[in-house]
């Protein structure tokens, strides 16, 4: 499933994070860990990638990331609000600088009124308080393509966030 474009995007992100001494975590639902798998395909990724939370079920989102039941009840698991709580929950449960979350409907089933197949929400968040949120409507392009495009979107958002982060101060300085 991994292709050249995915590996190149992952490699660029990892190189930037290494230079800035930034670490990251993923919180994934519809991609089932594919962002973390893409990053971990690159030798040396362990200097940057700390962990990946695969929270496919609503219960997992709540238990592992602290997504509130109210968020899921009011907005649904496939929502901007849930994506934001997932990313912030990853930061709260891992000692990392950056986190990205993905929640959506990869298809071919799972659509509900107002939430079609191919709808995916993303949030990238930094420990410094920056967040980026996006939603994408990929349409019914096939499960594998929705997941691939979602990985590329998540990597791009992490790249954007990492570019704005200040490098870690040298050891022993305040």
Image (cartoon, rainbow, N blue to C red):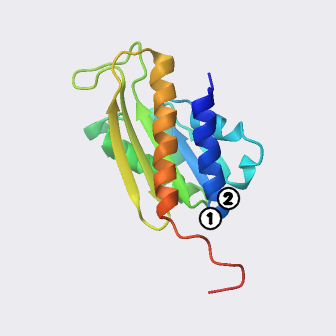
Q: Which residue is mark 1?
A: 20
Residue located at (56% from left, 30% from top) = 32
Q: Can residue 32 be seen from the camera position used here?
A: yes
In this rendering, position of residue 76 left or right of residue 127: left
On the rendered structure, is 79 left or right of 12? left
Q: Secondary structure at mark 1?
A: helix
- x, y percentage for residue 30? 48, 29
> Residue drawn at (62%, 61%), measured in percent from left and top?
22
169 lies above or below 27: below
Residue 25 at x, y = what percent?
A: 59, 50
Whether residue 62 can be seen here? no
Q: Residue furthest bottom?
A: 174
Q: Are marks 1 and 2 in contact (CB under 8 Å)?
A: yes
Q: Residue furthest right?
A: 43
- Report the front residue among 130 and 74: 130
Which of 68 and 104 lies nearest the eye of the viewer? 104
In the structure shown, which secondary structural element does the residue marked by tag 2 occupy?
helix
Residue at the (50%, 64%) spot, across then down: 127
Q: Which residue is mark 2?
A: 18
Residue plotted at (29% across, 21% down): 116
């Amino acid at each position: 499933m991994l292709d050249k474009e995915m590996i190149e995007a992952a490699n660029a992100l990892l190189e930037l994070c290494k230079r800035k001494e930034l670490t990251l975590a993923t919180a994934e639902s519809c991609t089932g860990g594919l962002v973390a798998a893409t990053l971990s395909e690159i030798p040396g990724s362990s200097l940057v990638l700390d962990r990946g939370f695969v929270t496919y079920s609503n219960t997992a989102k709540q238990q592992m990331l602290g997504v509130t039941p109210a968020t899921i009840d009011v907005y649904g698991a496939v929502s901007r609000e849930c994506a934001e709580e997932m990313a912030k929950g990853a930061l709260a449960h891992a000692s990392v600088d950056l986190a990205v979350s993905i929640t959506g409907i990869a298809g071919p089933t799972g659509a509900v009124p107002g939430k079609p197949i191919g709808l995916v929400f993303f949030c990238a968040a930094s420990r410094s308080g920056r967040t980026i949120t996006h939603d994408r409507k990929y349409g019914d392009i096939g499960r594998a393509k929705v997941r691939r495009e979602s990985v590329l979107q998540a990597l791009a958002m992490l790249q954007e966030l990492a570019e704005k982060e200040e490098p870690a101060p040298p050891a022993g300085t305040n």
